[in-house]
Amino acid sequence: MKARHSNLLAGVATLAMLGTAAPAMAQTADDGADTAAAASGSGNEIIVTAQKRAQNIQDVPISMEVVSGQRLDDFNSNDIKAVMNYTPNVFVQSTAGNDVIYIRGFGSPPANFAFDQSVSLYVDGVYAGRSRQAQAPFFDLARVEVLRGPQGALFGKNTAAGAVSVVSAGPTDRFEGKLTANYNFDFKGTDFSGYLSGPLTDTLSARLAMKVLNQQGYIRNLATDHDDPEIKQQLLRLTMKWEPSANFDYTAKVEYANRDVVGGITVSSPLTSAQDPHLTRYLDKSALGDEGTKTKSVMISGTGNIAIGDYTLTSVTGYSWFNANIVNGFDQTIPGGGGAFTNNSVYNSFPERFEQFSQEIRLLSPTGRTFDFIVGAYYDHGKYRLDQLQGFNIADLFGSPYFGRIDSRFNQTSESWSLFGQGTLNLADTFRVIGSLRYSHTSKDADFASRLVYGPFAIRPISSADGSLSEGNVDPSVTVQFDVAPRIMLYATYGRGSKSGGFVSNTLGTTNATFAFKPERSTNYEAGVKSTLFDGKVVANVSVYDTQFKNLQVSVYQPASSSYLTGNAASATSKGIEGSLALYLSPNLDITASGAYQDIKYDDYPGAACLASQPSTCTPATNNLAGYRLAYTSKWTGNVSAHGRVPLGDDLKLDITGVAAGRSKYFDSDNQSPIFGIQKGYVKLDLRVQLSDADERWFLAFVGKNLTNELTTGSAFNLPAPITAVPRAILYLEPPRNLSIEAGFKF
């Protein structure tokens, strides 16, 4: 405990000495597009749309954090992982398959590609349940809202653990533009981004934003003499807003993303000692092609608002499509082997194709009355196809070499609809009760089949399965709010969330008996206080929670069978406290800090895969993990940031922004190995130093990320024999220190 605290406090002290770090909370939210979701703040206010209305975050009875688009731009953020630095109790797991979001310890593991996520991602109001749907959104943003805990009523679609709402920047009332160029010295590459925005006519405005990324990786591949992973990405978004009258507006957005990643992020480490990641690997081209990921995606949305008297009718239409292929291999370098390597390997490929159409309609009443409400309906339809091509090149299996391949295909069609409503009863100016209810119905049809493509025999079982499900879930919530002072609000909430059941998509040997898994449900009890003190110079919030999950959906790796066990854990509970503090010390200096403590355990988990710490006689048939902590969860998470401005005469100014983000140790392997499966606690430091003219029409900046060069891993597993001649741990290595220079101008 002392070591964890000293690590976190060291980072805080270091940053305090720097005297820098602008809080995400210091940014005023403004999406500039959706009138049902847009508002401008004043002073230190942040306007959010967590309850489908524009509200000051201090009036919203939800434990949540907001990360501004400017903050993400300042540190060249390209994906959802950047949000983790600013939001305690949020973790994004890095693997070769999917990046998965966990909130308060709960998320949907990446091994089963067909999982709906327990933490839902919404992009401009459109549900994006798969990570490759959301490549384009992470540039030119207004803000990212992170809502912790079940959000079953107003977000609804699979928000058992929480929701992340991404709001892109919208067209502006006057013509403006920006162009930024960044060169990363460590990744040896460039990042160009920019936008043009303004009115086209009296009633029509537009915004065109783009981003082009070309960077080398941070791990030297000795087999190819290449730095893995090399990333080439092109992103484009066009937003148009039509306002023919004061009573009607419509915003349409089209996003396109093309992302090519050459190489992977796996490195080898011993099984007999703590994680020891190195920045080298050895992996040649496999029979399935070059390791990496290729993804093309399109996301289209349309949001319209029409005033009907004092009421507002809102329509949100969405279409999402992606086509992707992942080719995985695993580093073959043997730790301690003097750089030797083996040809023993397993490699796989996951071609995916997905499309989704969604429609939401909601009616908002005016506020300021005794009773105000939101009612609505939602529908979506999706198709998903996943192929798995799994190859084996094993030098000595049952006394002879083995070279073979097994393919499988998973098809799923899904349809869901829901009805929802939320009402607020204002019993007094300082006291209100909020009730909400959502009914969701989901149906899915799926099939799975595998076959031996070549090889002397099938090294894994050949099987097939098909199934269908039709289920309904009811998610209620009740919140009581009390303003104990003009800018101090207390709240208490009871709420439920749910995530639909589904099917096992890519585990060889799947049969009808193991194909389906049940829906998971969550129940959350939460209480908190939100306060704004000393004329807005201090903003302090704290919340306590108790979140319980039933039928938690899991998928864990079993080294003994080199496969995944997918199904429902019986139950788990997470309890904790979350807090944030923002200090606006002067117009030129502000500091924020946020942190969380979490205690999370399985309440009951019969039939679980055995952990490394359990006796060798353990078998899944008799195993129960009741009382064990969940993997990928830290007891302590936190961050501190500060932002200082220094005028340099009348024409120039210096902006210094620093961020320290850390967490205590956690298991990052499914089997929770106490040897190779622990990521030790860490604090990472980021720094931006910017010189600009007084109006920031031009700027020149230095950006340093992970300045202390903490080598951390997002995931780990045991690569066993006979897949490899020397069993070892495979670690998914996160980026080390990287420094860049950035220049840009606005007009």
Image: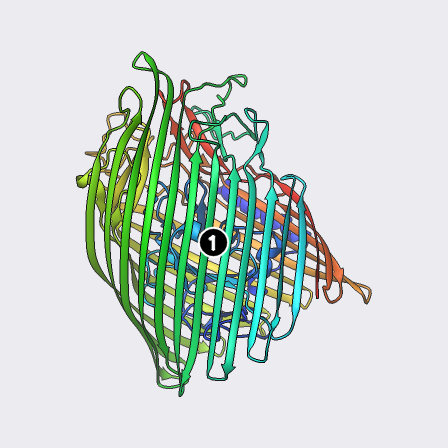
Q: Which residue is mark 1?
A: 88
Is residue 429 in sight in this rendering?
Answer: no
Q: Residue at x 39, y 51 (%)?
A: 130
**What amino acid type is highlighted by mark number 1?**
Pro
Indicate the colouring scheme: rainbow
Q: Residue at x 39, y 52 (%)?
A: 104
- Residues packed near mark 1 inside 10 Å, few (<14), some (14 to 19) or many (20 plus): many
Q: Quadrant of residue 506?
A: top left
Residue 545 position (above or below residue 716) = below
Name the image quarter holding the C terminus.
bottom right
Residue 557 position (above or below residue 23) = above
The residue tagged with tag 1: helix, strand or loop? Answer: loop
Q: Is residue 610 left or right of residue 76?
A: left
Residue 410 position (above or below residue 368) = above
Residue 454 position (above or below residue 297) = above
Is residue 252 in sight in this rendering?
Answer: yes
* Camera-nearest residue between 645 and 101: 101
From the top left corner, tell me how far across and down residue 103 is, in percent.
40, 53
